[in-house]
Amino acid sequence: MDLGQGRRGVDMGPSALRVANLNERIASLGYQVTDLGNVEVDQPETAPVGPSNARYLDQISHTCTRLAGMVEDAAGDGQFPLVLGGDHSIAAGTVSGMSRHFQKRGQNLGLIWIDAHADMNTPDSSPSGNIHGMPLACCVGMGPQELTHIYGYAPKIRPENVAVVGLRSVDEVERLNVRQTGVNAFTMRDIDERGLRNIMEEAVSAALAGTAGFHLSFDMDSVDPQEAPGVGTPVKGGITYREAHLAMEILCDSGGITSIEVVEVNPVLDEANRTAMLAVELILSAMGKRIL
């Protein structure tokens, strides 16, 4: 998926992760890996842009609905869904699928969102109209109904069960959305002042409060561009290589991860596939790889 943002190339992210031996390395941890291939996505060259404040909305909602079904089916079969992006707009589909899986069982889902950006714009507040800046808002019930109401209900996640970690680039109006919804937001200043371990423990506590577990949505631009150059919207001052691994290890130790997505790997902007290789390493840490 690259319909949700303005720079081409992020649609090749899943291929870059496969080239970095993702499947084989997950299997080395003892998992049985089933690769379901790429979800069908309409191409920008043949698709109408649609409304200027929510570009490619129809195509993105169609794709997210397809993805939601695949994720729900995988979770229902007892599998652990791992979704590869692509831009972050896919999260509206992933989270919908996992939310529906637990809703049918009378349970709630938590969400840990690690990102340089809040992704809580709506068509009314977005300065660009790019939907990759809106998916978290959609998950908590704000934004286009085509995305908020996949499966016919909203919100998919209660705001108090959402933790956003690593914020350092938030639009002016978007700040109001973050505050008004009541999601738990942790900025880079919070990490600097209090340490990543404390922040991650608070995030886990919020995401597990009254839920059956949490989905992890990891945007590679949360990591500092010196370590992850291959992203579409890099922002200086991100989490370090070791902090990123520590975050994944803490989340794994919590026993609460139900599913993972890793997004915004752009091989066109990368250096010798460094960002994809780091993404694979982080996925492995989240799924149980340890130093000893």
Image: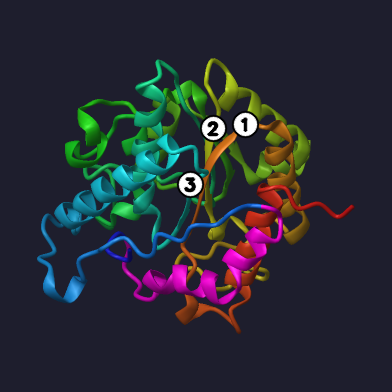
Q: What count of labels does the image hold? A: 3
Left or right position of 102 against 187: left
Question: Up-down: is 106 above or below 219?
Answer: above
Amino acid, disc 3:
Pro
Query: Where is mark 3, residue-wise?
Result: 81
Q: Position of residue 192 (x, y in %)?
A: 74, 44
Q: Secondary structure at mark 3?
A: loop
Residue 252 in percent (x, y) is at 69, 40
Q: CB under 8 Å between callouts 1 and 2?
A: yes
Disc 2 target residue:
214
**Few, some or many C-alpha atoms within 10 Å of disc 3 (few <14, some 14-19, many ≥20)?**
many
Q: Please provide percent x and percent y for residue 126.
A: 29, 49
Give the alpha-carbon distance from disc 1 to disc 2, as whole Å.
Answer: 6 Å
The mark that comes first in sequence, 3 or 2, is: 3
Task: Kindly identify which numbered label has been placed on residue 180.
Answer: none
Instruction: Mark 2: give few (<14), some (14-19) or many (20+) Cα within 10 Å.
Output: many
Extreme residue toward the right, this view: 292
Badge 2 marks a residue whose secondary structure is strand
Looking at the rendering, which quadrant does residue 121 occupy?
A: top left
Q: Give the residues drawn in magenta, as a range.
A: 5-30
How far apart marks 3 and 2 lie (CA) works out to 12 Å
Residue beneath disc 1: 256
Q: Residue at x 45, y 70 (%)?
A: 13
- Residue 26 magenta-drawn? yes
Distance of mark 3 from mark 1, alpha carbons?
Answer: 14 Å
**Which one is closest to the eye, mark 3 or mark 2?**
3
Which quarter of the rendered picture does the N terminus lie within? bottom left
- Element under label 1? loop
